[in-house]
Image (cartoon, rainbow, N blue to C red):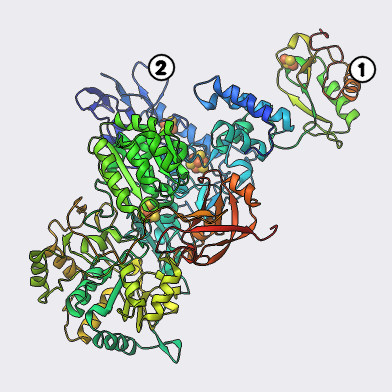
Amino acid sequence: MARVLSQAVLAEIERARARYPRPQSAVLPALHAAQEEVGYLSPEALDDVAEALGLPVTEVASVATFYSMFFTEPVGRHKIRVCTNLSCYLNGCEEILDHLCRTLGVRPGETTADGRVLVEVAECLAACEEAPVLLADEDRHGHMTPAKVDALLRALDREPSATSPTGPAGDA
Amino acid sequence: MSSERAPASPAQMVHLTIDGRPVAVPKGTTVWQAARQNGIEVPVFCYHDRMPPLGACRMCLVEVEKMPKLATSCTLEAGEDMVVRTQTDRVRQAQQAILELLLVNHPLDCPICDKGGECPLQDNTLRFGPGQSRFVETKRQFRKHVRMGPVLVLDRERCILCWRCVRFGEIVAGDDALKGFERGYHSQIATPAMEPVRSKFIGNTMEICPVGALTSATYRFRSRPWDNRTVQSVCPHCGCGCATTLNVRGADLTRTRPREHPEVNDIWLCDKGFFGYEFVGSPERLRAPLVRRDGALREATWDEALGRVADALRSTSPEAVGVIGGARSTNEDDYLLLRLFRGVVGTNNIDFRVETAYPQPTSRAAWGLPVAIADVERADAIVLVGCDLTEEYPILWLRVKKAIDRGAPLVIAGAWEPEVARWAQHRLIHRRGGEAALLRALAGGVRAEDGAAASGAPAEAIRAAADTLRAAPRALVLAGEAALEQPGAERVLAALDELCAACHGAPLGILRGRGNSGGAQVLGLLPDMLPGYRPLGDPSAREAVAAVWGRPVPSAPGRTVRGMLEAARAADLEVLYVVGADPASDYPDARAWEEARRGLRCLVVHELFLTRTAEAADVVLPVLAYAEKTGTVANIEGRVQRQDQALLGPGVARSDAEIFVDLASRLGSPLAVASWEQVFAEIGRMIPGWAEGARLAPPRPGAGAGRDGAGIPDGPLPRPEGALALVAGRRLFDRGTMAARCPGVRGQAGEPFVAVHPEDAARLGLRDGMPCEVRSPRGALRLAVRVWAGVHRGHAYAPRGYDSAPVSVLLDERGPVAVTVRPLGAP
Ligand code: SF4
Ligand code: SF4
Ligand code: FES
Ligand code: FES
């Protein structure tokens, strides 16, 4: 008796479960699917995932808190993660982060009051050659400048779910 | 931490040197174990000998020749010609470094920490640690003391992340109660959203936590270890008879801890055992005898109260006297009960089985385990029929879990899913009343389809479970109250025998009885049995008893509890003597009890508290609790264990034994009892093999039968339209007489409820948490609805053991009842 997850997501979890001999292996894909639907991993969402996989909710919740891409509190619908590791640091990520935060009126780790955007700092995004780099939802944006940040935010405004102004690979 | 188990086959030995000493150990032994077995202590934190090694804390580092780096001895298997050193400067430096790092974030608040004085971190730091810390920065800070439910207090600042508590839940208890959350610097032990921990075994994590991160809410700040006196005892609750140590400070019972007993509880207890002790010190304990005068119970002297009882016994013919109870007394109390009532008064109306309306004759189906508790973990397959194991006999579950870990399949049959269903390979959830057919189908005596038709469990599942069982050479079959407390129990028993035979002669355990039921049964607090499982009908057995007692034993079998209540209603029974039992709440038909009570001329009750039964009594005698007297008890496997007096009783309360001795004198036949040891020895003259630690398992099956009371209807359940079949189950945490006065148990019990299947809930307009009225032809209760897919469709599950809402109000001794569940509006 799922509380918050739709039949579609439950079916997706079931497919993930069927791929592995042990249900533990399906925890990550199941959590991703649940978070995508609910926006974050609420206690009810964790209960549903646990029930769907036949695992104790403690185990599922423990995994959910281990990975930084999972949220157990409500966060912005869009997540922007600015890399602040060495290469990006040397290439001016501070300015990018600063501009982003000032434009949105948040501090790193916070969500805008309208619940639209979460800003976070990230460790190396494995694209140092494009530093400074940020991740907007699923999409990577390299060689960032304040102007490109503004364009990105406008794109988010226009299209709530598609986040990249030029498409996932178009900005190299 | 003691008694490590060396790997089983001693055939292959490996030879190594530890600190210059040649050592031989069986292959598979770790270096840590090898050192330990040879008296060399290597400090540990994460390693615990009841769980496989983890290698997380690195406290156990040793130097091994030819290995460039220090090695964790807890994970390293001893190898041939290994040369190990545990005392070198390198090792000592490493130990100091580990401890210094652990203490970086440890608050060192020993002065306000309950663990102080029995803390491995303190001890290891003192013995192996550096004298000083170089760390001057700020320590990791968390909210001090998170209360995680009624019994557990978590202090994350003290935690050294050894993972023992987490692994206990995963490996030993199988309840996954605590987990590691977050990671790296933020790692912490928690539950989702810090909700109250859900476990029946969490007390054990407080025992094995090597620091004061997990402490007990009931013991908190009550005492220091060195101020506690320790007294050996036995848990009085479920019937497993776990060995315990009571801690006493001044006149207070401060806590209960497990006492290692490899055959019974190993080193564990369940949380009822850990936290179910506070009733002993309750201010509501009865302190003086009460006698009914002018319609009300009033305090009286022992002389007046016992004079009243003696008068009643003297003026009544023996067949009109009955005795109920004895499962909360010691063996010595119970034996003197027999000498008084069988020997002096001359009645066989004696029965300890207060909570059953369908008593199967003991000679046919004695209660208890035919194997030792420790043997349960050695079974190759386990069938659990009508028993909610963690709710009823929690410590047995830990053995079953070990069997499962060894690869033994668990097969479960019941009208609802027990908590451990997740671990079962086959779950046969069925209609109540379908047990016999289902079991016969499992045994192959009837077709799976027929079993399915009669029970509602899928034929496919029955077939699969039957195949699994057939493949197990040494299965164990365990049946509980839910399967046997019904009119068709004789057929269920026959089907169980059939199943055992089909499982290559598997032993059958009847998981029933609580407290000292085991002792009451061995001694024969039964209408048709004598001490040592000898049938009353055997003249030589009667003579043997008479020879010791110097008085004849009446030969006509007595009445069961149900028979006594029926006789009371018919005014054939006039005096009822209840010893540590509450039939008004626990006999499975409250109305039948009330009618019986009205028929009695005199009701006498031995009690700790003014129970429902005591409130209606003519004489209430205050007695000592388990912690207040020395004596022996026997558990569900028939093992005799001693419990010592830890405290004085309240007011002028006396032991049951003293009361029986006094009454015998008043009736003109003194019993001449000097001490419990003398009584214990006298029991030994009657029961071969009687000794402390001995196991007196019931012979099975035997001959003979008891009088079970009049006509027990047997047949399909009459069920009005829309009604649900009522099933009553036990809960470990309930609110009965004793549990209600233990905050640590009471708090976990929650409010009484009725559970219904989601489909029935939808049909009846019931939602989770909604108040509702549950009505049977016998009575009605107001309960909260719990919508639960674990109960079979068409059934309503209600817990026993809530004195404020006794399910016995709904039950009918004449047969299963159907109930209507009606919503009483939104919560
Ligand atoms: S709470 Fe105790 S047992 Fe659990 S990980 Fe921390 S120190 Fe170890
Ligand atoms: S399992 Fe039974 S005997 Fe053991 S501690 Fe728990 S209630 Fe007491
Ligand atoms: S440091 Fe930013 S992407 Fe590698
Ligand atoms: S005890 Fe060996 S690593 Fe912890």
Residue nearest the viewer, comparing B509 with B255:
B509
Residue nearest the viewer, comparing B791 with B730:
B791
Amino acid residing under circle 1: Ala
User: Is residue B83 among the parts visible in the rendering?
Assistant: yes
Residue drawn at point x = 46 percent, y = 34 percent: B96
Residue B238: horizontal and vertical position, in percent? 37, 56
Tell me the quadrant of the picture where the N terminus of chain A can be found.
top right
Q: Are marks 2 and 1 in contact (CB under 8 Å)?
A: no
From the viewer's perspective, tell me whether residue B359 is left or right of residue B220: left
Tell me the quadrant of the picture where the C terminus of chain A can be found.
top right
Amino acid residing under circle 2: Pro
Q: Quadrant of residue B652?
A: bottom left
Q: Chain of mark 1?
A: A
Q: Residues within 10 Å of mark 2 (few under 14, many from 20)?
A: few
Residue drawn at point x = 21 percent, y = 86 percent: B667
Residue B30: horizontal and vertical position, in percent? 32, 28
Say the numbered circle drawn on residue A147.
Answer: 1
Say the numbered circle drawn on residue B68.
Answer: 2
Q: Residues within 10 Å of mark 1 (few under 14, many from 20)?
A: few
> Which numbered mark, 2 or 1, is in the foreground of this view?
1
Above/below status of B719 relative to B137 = below
Tag 2's secondary structure? Answer: loop
Residue B545: horizontal and vertical position, in percent? 12, 69
Residue nearest the viewer, comparing B579 with A43:
B579
Q: Quadrant of residue B128?
A: top left
Residue nearest the viewer, comparing A129 with A71:
A71
Residue A80: horizontal and vertical position, in percent? 79, 24
